[in-house]
Image (tube, helix red, strand yellow):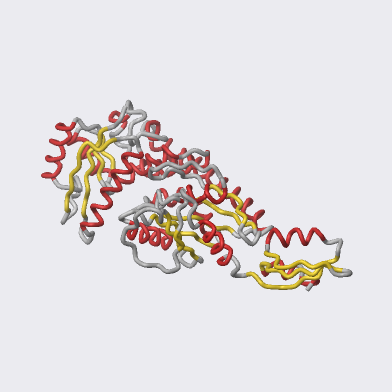
């Protein structure tokens, strides 16, 4: 059954009208991704936050009439509600009421596919639900499978606070185990230090399509928000012959709920350990400028602004919208393959930072070292001499030290 939703845009003080309306349009896409349809919409400019309902008594009355007139199943507020505001609105409107955070969490629950992703979503949902359990069990106990009730939603509402806390402890332990396992895998990667490139960008910018175009990774792709949540890491051979690792990451969005940032820490760690961040921008999106700003804000919150960066302008085969000129950006189309070869060349150049140009003279019985040079560096020329193999190459500083006896 498809949920019929009324969405309510909220412009808070010090928030531009353009930004508030763009956020509301994004909410439409979130509803669609969650499997619902927008039956109506309202917009409220809030000069002073109403402590009981956020939007004020008059707007609640208008909203109630629209709920009855459209036979809506759910009202979704494009803001974050306090538990009290949420309960008051549900009593007044007599339908389910969700805020922006709850809807995003629901979409994440729908999209999570791996065990790790499901654990992360459940941890985020329980952190959100904990202060909202009082008086909601009867309202939602029979609403399994509807917007706002996926993941642990329908069962979490039946927990006592004590049992909910116990479940959170279990989830945190399991997530900590996931982080330890990631740390082990990362340590193994660092023993043979293939550079790691993290793809980041606004949700639906084309990261997964680019991942598939470059590595044939088979990552799920769909024209919806948050089509993929679970990080994918694949090997990629660059034009020089060097191997690198490419990581797809969760898409960013306006006002990404802090519960998700905390729960998906293991996913964001892939960005933290990346040698290079590739920022994918959908230049065909009319709101591209705001999307770029959102990604920059989230990277700043994660303290990752210092990372080396490449900006990639995806969907350049479509009619581009106004976007601040960036002469360093790489225009591509992940869908058609246009510009991919140039992107690979730029990746190759960017990842040579920290490499040294050296000449090694290897004994003929050390073919193992020559094979490793091809794998972790770039060989310009290999010449067989009378007693040695002369290798002109670029290597990470770590390996120059490791093989300095052959210099």
- Of all residues, the one furthest to the right in this rendering is 386
Left or right side of 400 for 308 = left
Left or right side of 333 for 53 = left
> What residue is drawn where x is 21% and y is 54%?
11
Indicate the quadrant where residue 30 lies: top left
Q: Nearer the viewer, residue 229 or 98?
A: 229
Instruction: Tell me the quadrant of the picture where the N terminus can be found.
Output: top left
Left or right side of 195 for 281 = left
Looking at the picture, how far across and down is residue 98, in whole percent?
A: 28, 40
> What residue is drawn where x is 77% and y is 61%?
370
Left or right side of 166 for 143 = left
Q: Is residue 193 above or below residue 208?
A: below
Looking at the picture, how far across and down is residue 281, in whole percent?
A: 41, 57
Q: Nearer the viewer, residue 50 or 118?
A: 118
Indicate the quadrant where residue 275 lies: bottom right
> What residue is drawn where x is 29% and y is 28%?
138
Q: Nearer the viewer, residue 327 or 270?
A: 327
- Quick check: can you spot residue 350? yes
Q: Nearer the viewer, residue 143 or 132?
A: 143
Looking at the picture, how far across and down is residue 333, in whole percent?
A: 45, 53
Q: Is residue 57 above or below residue 157?
A: below
- Quick check: can you spot residue 303? no
Indicate the quadrant where residue 292 lies: bottom left
> What residue is drawn where x is 78% and y is 73%?
407
């Amino acid at each position: 059954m498809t949920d019929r939703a009324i969405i309510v845009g909220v412009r808070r003080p010090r928030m531009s009208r353009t930004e508030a309306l763009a956020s509301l349009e994004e909410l439409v896409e979130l509803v669609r991704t969650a499997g619902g349809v927008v039956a109506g919409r309202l917009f409220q400019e809030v000069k002073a936050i109403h402590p009981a309902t956020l939007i004020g008594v008059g707007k609640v009355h208008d909203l109630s009439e629209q709920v009855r007139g459209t036979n809506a199943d759910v009202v979704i507020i494009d803001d974050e509600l306090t538990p009290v505001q949420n309960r008051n609105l549900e009593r007044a409107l007599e339908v389910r009421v969700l805020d922006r955070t709850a809807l995003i969490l629901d979409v994440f629950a729908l999209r999570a596919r791996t065990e790790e992703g499901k654990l992360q979503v459940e941890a985020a949902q329980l952190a959100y639900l904990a202060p909202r359990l009082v008086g909601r069990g009867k309202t939602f106990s029979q609403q399994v499978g509807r917007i706002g009730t996926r993941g642990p939603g329908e069962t979490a509402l039946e927990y006592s606070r004590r049992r909910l806390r116990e479940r959170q402890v279990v989830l945190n332990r399991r997530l900590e185990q996931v982080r330890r396992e990631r740390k082990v895998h990362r340590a193994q990667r660092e023993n043979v230090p293939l550079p790691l490139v993290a793809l980041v960008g606004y949700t639906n910018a084309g990261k997964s399509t680019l991942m598939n175009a470059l590595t044939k990774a088979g990552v799920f792709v769909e024209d919806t928000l948050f089509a993929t949540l679970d990080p994918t890491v694949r090997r990629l051979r660059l034009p020089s012959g060097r191997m690198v690792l490419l990581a797809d990451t969760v898409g960013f969005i306006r006002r990404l709920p802090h519960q998700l940032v905390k729960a998906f820490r293991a996913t964001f760690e892939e960005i933290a350990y990346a040698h290079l961040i590739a920022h994918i921008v959908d230049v065909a999106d009319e709101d591209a400028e705001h999307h770029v700003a959102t990604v920059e804000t989230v990277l700043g919150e994660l303290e990752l602004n210092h990372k080396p960066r490449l900006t990639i302008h995806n969907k350049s085969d479509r009619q581009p919208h106004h976007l601040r000129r960036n002469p360093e950006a790489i225009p591509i189309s992940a869908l058609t393959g246009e510009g991919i070869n140039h992107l690979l060349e730029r990746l190759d150049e960017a990842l040579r930072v920290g490499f040294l140009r050296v000449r090694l003279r290897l004994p003929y019985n050390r073919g193992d070292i020559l094979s490793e040079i091809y794998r972790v560096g770039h060989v310009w020329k290999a010449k067989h001499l009378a007693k040695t193999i002369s290798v002109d190459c670029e290597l990470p500083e770590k390996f120059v030290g490791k093989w300095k006896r052959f210099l």
